[in-house]
Amino acid sequence: MNWLVRFLFLLVAGAVLLLVLLVSLLGLALSLLRWLITGQQPQIAMVFQTYRHWQRQAAKQMPPGHRQEDVIEAEVRELPPSDTHKP
């Protein structure tokens, strides 16, 4: 009986996964069809295009020679309990 319940849950999970996949593909197909008919890009394409544009603008405004891999090192030390009051 236990294996039957597991098999039933596996079957239901597979059906839900297949349904979500089909709905996603249908939405993508409708979005692409709308893009072909109206010439309007899908909203998600506009978001990515704006993000890429923002990245290029930010890269242009960085000073020359600035690298993103720069590492700032700092010395860390503990204060003794008697020096907890700041001047």
Image (cartoon, grey):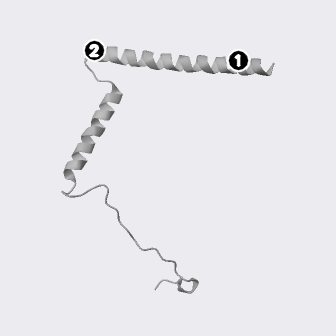
Residue 3: which quarter of the image?
top right
Residue 36: which numbered mark, if any? 2
Query: Residue 57 location in percent, x, y?
Result: 22, 45
Q: Which residue is mark 1?
A: 8
Mark 1 to mark 2 CA distance (whole Å): 42 Å
Mark 1: secondary structure = helix
Badge 2 crowding class, 10 Å Cα cut-off, few under 14, some 14 to 19, many 20 or more, is: few
Residue 6: which quarter of the image?
top right
Closer to us: 51 or 7: 7
Residue 15 placement, left or right of 32: right
Q: Disc 1 residue type? A: Leu
Relative to residue 68, is residue 79 depicted above or below?
Answer: below
Relative to residue 52, is residue 1 depicted above or below?
Answer: above
Q: Residue at x 37, y 68 (%)?
A: 73
Q: Residue at x 40, y 19 (%)?
A: 28
Query: Residue 75 location in percent, x, y?
Result: 42, 74
Relative to residue 35, is residue 62 depicted above or below?
Answer: below
Closer to us: 53 or 6: 6
